[in-house]
Amino acid sequence: MMRVLVTGGAGFIGGAVVRRLLADSGTIVFNLDKLGYASDLTGIQQQLVGSVAERHVLQQVNLVDAETTVAAVQQADPDLVLHLAAESHVDRSIAGPEEFLASNVSGTFNLLQAVRKHWEALPRERQEQFRFHHISTDEVFGSLGKSGRFSETTPYDPRSPYSASKAASDHFVNAWHHTYGLPVVLTNCSNNYGPWQFPEKLIPVVILKALAGEPIPLYGDGANVRDWLFVEDHVDALLLAATKGKLGHSYCVGGHGERTNKQVVETICTVLDQLRPQGAPHAGLITLVADRPGHDRRYAINASRISSELGWQPRHGLEQGLEATVRWYLSNLDWCQAVLQQAGYSGGRLG
Ligand code: NAD
Ligand code: TDX
């Protein structure tokens, strides 16, 4: 049975990866996570029925602690590592950048050292099959003007504490490949959305504010552009890249889902008008608020490498994915309240 170590498996995307691995394959999953404010295991626990439970091992570990990280990697004894653990919210990185340096840079460094030690000690056959997949973001490439798209050859130009920390982690991963021969693959993905996303990111914030009849905060002029990808489509890409991607290569992943924030927010409001009519259109709640400092204007991805080399395509269009997401949140409002309460976050402006 293949042994897979997923870091950040109690988070939004890592959780989707863990659920897919448990559902689709004969893998044993070691789920390493510090169990921070954005972590929640409800979706995974719903799946731990019968023998599936034996294929999920939770390791509560903070990657900032080098010794515990080494021990966790040794216990997992992995054939494949999917590294998703990171502080992920740009607004929080503006308010408190230290945690991003610690988790995203030192945490990745500690994991690389622990994984290298493990990989170097593997018997030859397992060593040749072993892979380390680092999950990164399109934000490392900076901000686009009106035209053009990011690709694997775009120079790095991170502009927020979050993206600077992710860029640094990408460089460490590449250095461990070039210097020590560690077999790595990287992916740089655009904005994800879908079920189980902690309600601090744009899409769940908009849904919850609209349902509460509260102002929906749109930063700046609302014309910033993101390239939205449904989280399950990202999982497809990650598992392909992790298992079939060329070693030492990176792959850009995007949803062909470029929209302004205003368009996204208005679409959610229209879906809510149909599913939860409240007398007046929800769009009346949209309120322009002070811009995010250093707010990147536009992200867009050219995903032709992963598409031509690995045959990946997103399966969900944005409008379809957004409607499914709104329906999911409407059915899981208790979960939203529970995770917000546990995190001690009341939905106010961050950053
Ligand atoms: P998330 O915040 O929902 O989850 C991250 C998880 O990592 C959390 O459970 C957290 O506890 C864990 N973690 C953080 N620091 C840790 C540490 N020091 N030790 C152990 N665990 C730690 O984030 P997400 O949206 O699921 O993002 C996952 C990864 O994907 C991140 O690396 C992020 O940079 C990347 N990414 C996210 C998006 C997106 O749109 N959400 C897009 C592209 C790339
Ligand atoms: O209340 C809001 N109002 C608003 O206008 C929030 C929370 C956000 N925004 C804007 C800022 C961005 O232009 O919406 C856009 C999306 O914001 P976020 O959901 O915070 O995502 P973003 O900053 O684009 O980063 C996300 O995508 C790339 C993830 O959080 C990162 O982890 C990932 O790397």
Image (cartoon, rainbow, N blue to C red):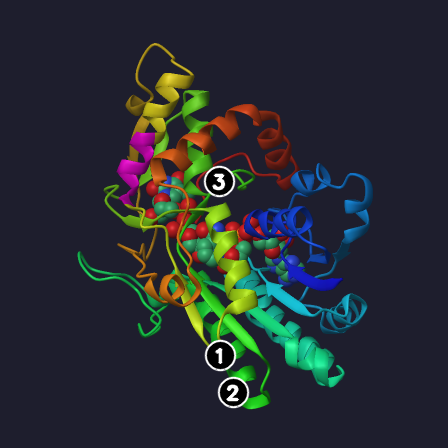
The quarter of the image that holds ligand 1 is: bottom right
Instruction: Check contact, mark 1 vs mark 2: CB within 8 A.
Output: yes
Q: Which amino acid type is marked by label 1?
A: Gly
Residue 81 location (% of width, % of height): 64, 67
Can residue 95 be seen at all in this image of the molecule? no
Name the residue furthest bottom: 179
Amino acid type of the residue tagged 2 in the rendering: His
Residue closest to the eye, 98 or 56: 56
Q: Residue sitting at 71 percent across and 78 percent down? A: 126
Q: Hey, what amino acid is under mark 3?
A: Gly
Q: Main secondary structure of the magenta part?
A: helix
Location of residue 249 in the rendering, given as x and y in whole percent from the top left corner:
45, 75
The residue lying toward the viewer, choosing from 191 and 105, is 191
Label at residue 178: 2
Q: Image check: 157 left or right of 165?
A: left
Q: Is mark 2 within 8 Å of ligand 1?
A: no
> Which residues, given as a range, are shown in magenta?
259-267
> Which label is found at residue 210?
none
Tags 1 and 3 touching, CB below 8 Å: no
The residue wearing badge 3 is 194
Give the SS element for disc 1. loop
Q: Separation of disc 1 and disc 3 at Cα?
A: 30 Å
- Give the percent coordinates (x, y) of residue 130: 65, 75
User: In this rendering, which labeled residue sits more in front, label 1 or label 2?
Assistant: 1
Disc 2 versus disc 3: distance between alpha carbons?
36 Å
**Can the viewer see residue 305?**
yes
User: In percent of the image, x 68 and y 76: which residue is there?
Assistant: 115
Q: Are marks 2 and 3 in contact (CB under 8 Å)?
A: no
**Which residue is denoted by mark 1 in the rendering?**
248
Q: Nearer the N terminus, badge 1 or badge 2? A: 2
Q: For residue 6, what is the image quadrant?
A: bottom right
